[in-house]
Amino acid sequence: MKIAPLKTPGNSAYERGKEFGNRGQCNPTYFTVGALVERLQQLRDEEGKSAKEIVEQYAFVTAGGCGPCRMGMYATEYRKALRDSGFAGFRVMLLSRSGEATALSSGMKLPRAAFVNGFTGIIVGDILNVLRQRLSTYEAHEGDAERAVRACRDLIENALAHRRSVLWAAWKCRAILRAVPVNRLQVRPRILIQGEFWAKTTEGQGNYDLYRFLKKEGAEPVIETISDWLVHQIWRAGWSLRRREDLARHDAKAGGLKGKSVWKTRLAYAFAEGLLRGIFNLYARVIGLKDYKITDNKALADLAGKHMDLHLDGGEDHMEIGHHIQAVTERKANMILSVKPFTCLSSNGVSDGIQPILAEIYPRSIFVSVETNADAPANFYSRIQMQLFKAKKAAAQEVEEALARTGQTMEEVQAELAARPFRHAATHRSPHVYACDAANLVLEVGRRRGRKLAAVPVASAAVEAPAGAALA
Ligand code: SF4
């Protein structure tokens, strides 16, 4: 069995998706359906395969959903577009928490090795992606980070394809990534990108090249990983199980609990989550990503649950709200950017209704919500730039505060780093105190020089607005 990814969809895929899709769909459907149709047309028109051969020899595996949002209709959309573009009967299989085994086994046999390789590939890909964003933000010479990550990707791909040790390949990546020259004293605000899953993770015209835009504007994009999303899916399945277990005897619908052992199912979820976290942490440590923690969904639900009903399933659920609160209270980001396709039900319709309340409770929050609809980049960019201005100021203030607390000047910090650079500077991350990485580096250099830390100014320490000040 051979597995290949579809290339990142661009505007031509979007047009193709609109041509063969139904009206009124979310734009990730158009982009992804269009990308699939484009690929199949390429196989037919450029590689000379007949439609019959393509239908028999190829299959498409994608993520599905079962929430109230339109993601539940993606498979139907794929099938319609494939039929109308001349590939009726082409197999589309969904991976979803409600029945991945059924979906896969009904359409194709997935050998265990292919499953393990795919799973490992996702995890290592996530780790490389996080490091890629960090290194390319602070790289001293443009393109170095991209080249290093590409070399790592080749090593991992080779190991997977020839059944060699992926762990050993990951170890080799460590040296390649550490060697990228970086300047981490650049004062760049950290921007947490959240929102609808596809819009926040794609790296092309589907979100107007958001990551590249932010870096060009002098910010550091902070991304969420597919592993985070997978752990969230397991958490959601476990949460739903707890809500339904009292009714187990009566739950006779397809996939229901009647006749099943609830505790065994619980154990299976706990095992799956532990395994995923364990493998992620192992590879992350080996590659050199030491400070990234996969989301604690219980903590997130506790935070978000104060402001919304956790039964609201679909899309990103309550994650946007939980992450927003965490980013502000734990100083994980200087700004929160929520990106979603035009009229996204879960992100626009639910989260965006709650976000203004958070801005009232947490005055330090800098938040912007932007929509993508494939044809209005100027509006999209200018809305981000307006908030980015504030985020840059916030990051600069953090650096000023760090300098003041350690009694240093920026010139002294630069001189210290020039004289005694950190080993493995590129993947090194200073202990987290502030959102802005340069501020944390200033504190770390200060400690190394034996400076005592002055207390945090009162105004900077306050996270929430005084009780009763804002919410009427
Ligand atoms: S999450 Fe939003 S954009 Fe994605 S399918 Fe649901 S409604 Fe559409």
Image (tube, grey):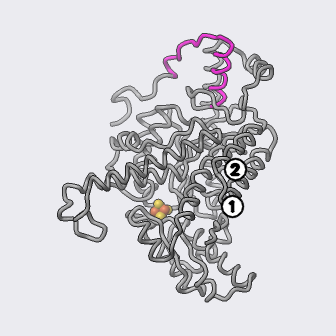
SS type, badge 1? loop
Q: Is residue 386 above or below residue 18?
A: above
Disc number for residue 346: none
Tell me which secondary structure the magenta stretch mostly adopts.
Answer: helix
Q: Is residue 307 magenta?
A: no
Quadrant location of the C terminus? top left
- Residue receiving disc 1: 162
- Residue receiving disc 2: 212
> In the drawing, does residue 100 fall left or right of residue 14?
left
Residue 20: image location, x then y, percent: 57, 80
For image coordinates 73% across by 28% down, the residue present is 423
> In the drawing, does residue 284 fall left or right of residue 240?
right
Q: Is residue 459 magenta?
A: yes
> Disc 1, disc 2: CB below 8 Å?
no
Q: Is residue 159 visible?
A: yes
The magenta segment: 437-460
Task: Write down the quadrant of residue 408 in the picture.
Answer: top right
Front of the two marks 1 and 2: 1
Q: Which one is nearer the viewer's eye here, 56 or 203?
A: 56
Amino acid marked by disc 1: His
The disc, 1 or 2, on the residue closer to the chain's N-terminal end is 1
The Cα atoms of the two marked residues, 1 and 2, are separated by 33 Å
Residue 471: image location, x then y, percent: 35, 36
Q: Is residue 64 above or below residue 469?
A: below
SS type, badge 2? helix
Residue 60: image location, x then y, percent: 56, 73
Q: Is residue 214 visible?
A: no
